[in-house]
Amino acid sequence: MLKHDIVVVGASAGGVETLSQLVKALPSNFPATVFIVIHLPGSEKSFLPAILSRSASLPVAHAVDQEAIRPGHVYISPPNHHMLIKQGHISVVQGPKENGHRPAIDPLFRTAARAYKNQVIGIVLSGMLDDGTAGLMEIKRQGGIAIVQDPEDALFSGMPKSAIAHVDVDYVLPIADIGASLIDLVGKPAKETGGESMKDETDETDETDETDETDETEAGDMAVKPVTSLPTDERQGNPSGFVCPECGGALWESEDSGFARFRCRTGHAYSGQSLLSEQSDHLEAALWNAIRLLDERAVLLSRMAEQARDRHHDFSANQYEDKMKSFKQSAELIRMALHQKLDIAN
């Protein structure tokens, strides 16, 4: 009889402390396999296995591509790689970012649900925005169990609140109680504890599974290979009118129980919140760049005005000075708008 022997965990901001508490609660004879994704900068080395090993009774290590899944082990996605779950083994790939992250939580949850169905327990911990929500939907759709850290207990409540708002979660618990619940759940037959899919349940949508050849990291209702483009007839969803912040390609939109998802032909995927966040970052960068260019033009025009006056070309000097003042005013207006934007964000 199938048991709940696949545990997938997603965390972001505030997640290291939370994960340490979670793995500490699991005994050395814990019969399930634990997979963890935490958002980390792709350019930095991850010391998370060493950190968690200090408090864990189970062996903790970064996942290795094509490594066999072993019960009683904790696998962590390495920096700048997605960790995907297949029958019997792990796939570690550098697919397109999802929700602005690589590794992202949704690909782990989604592939685990499709490979192991109702054997999966998905856990969303502390973090901002909403990565993990779409993946938790898929876990529930396949009959698995959804656990979310109590937002009041999380250092950052965005991810837990999003999961609770969109998924019919089975348990909302403080981190101190999640470990004990896992110990209890993994001992029960999978068919006894599988839940319903999502809040405001709608008709299920067929989603193309990832293949061994391409390791697709599809999101929502849109399946896109991570590196190559898809023929037109393979696109799913509707044109959104937005462009991908990562590559500039057109974004296609789908909706799952009121939860919007966006994906471009390349495969970059976003929820609504993550798309807003990425657009905000790009807008800020564009505004700073505009200020730099306007300031540089003002300086250049000032020099040209001085040179014109030295040659007694007063008419040209006046024109340069008028343009210089205009550029300075434009730069100041953008600077004020940018500072107002940053104040609102804080």
Image (cartoon, rainbow, N blue to C red):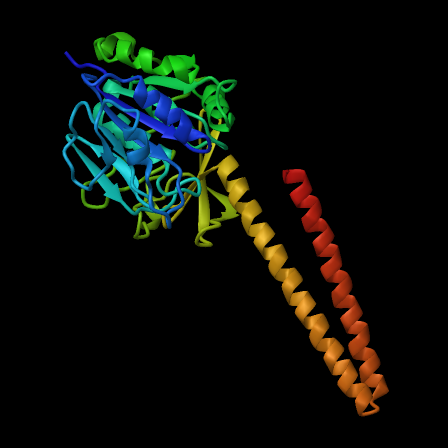
In this view, the residue in front, 135 or 81, is: 81
The answer, for residue 295, to whether it is visible in the render is: yes
Q: Which percent across, then down, holds residue 158?
A: 51, 28
Q: Quadrant of the N terminus?
A: top left
In this view, the residue in front, 164 or 260, is: 164
In this view, the residue in front, 86 or 261, is: 86
- Image quadrant assignment for residue 37: top left
Q: Quadrant of the C terminus?
A: top right
As displayed, is residue 282 above or below residue 50? below
Name the residue located 75 percent from the left edge and 56 percent from the top edge: 333
Q: Which percent across, then down, holds residue 82?
A: 30, 41
Name the residue located 68 percent from the left edge and 66 percent from the top edge: 294
In this view, the residue farthest toward the front is: 54
In this view, the residue farthest toward the bottom is: 311
Q: Which percent across, then down, holds residue 155?
A: 50, 26
Q: Which percent across, then down, holds residue 225?
A: 30, 46
Name the residue located 30 percent from the left edge and 33 percent from the top edge: 108
The answer, for residue 136, to whether it is visible in the render is: no
Q: In this image, 88 relative to 180: left or right? A: left
Name the residue located 63 percent from the left edge and 55 percent from the top edge: 287
The number of discs equals: 0
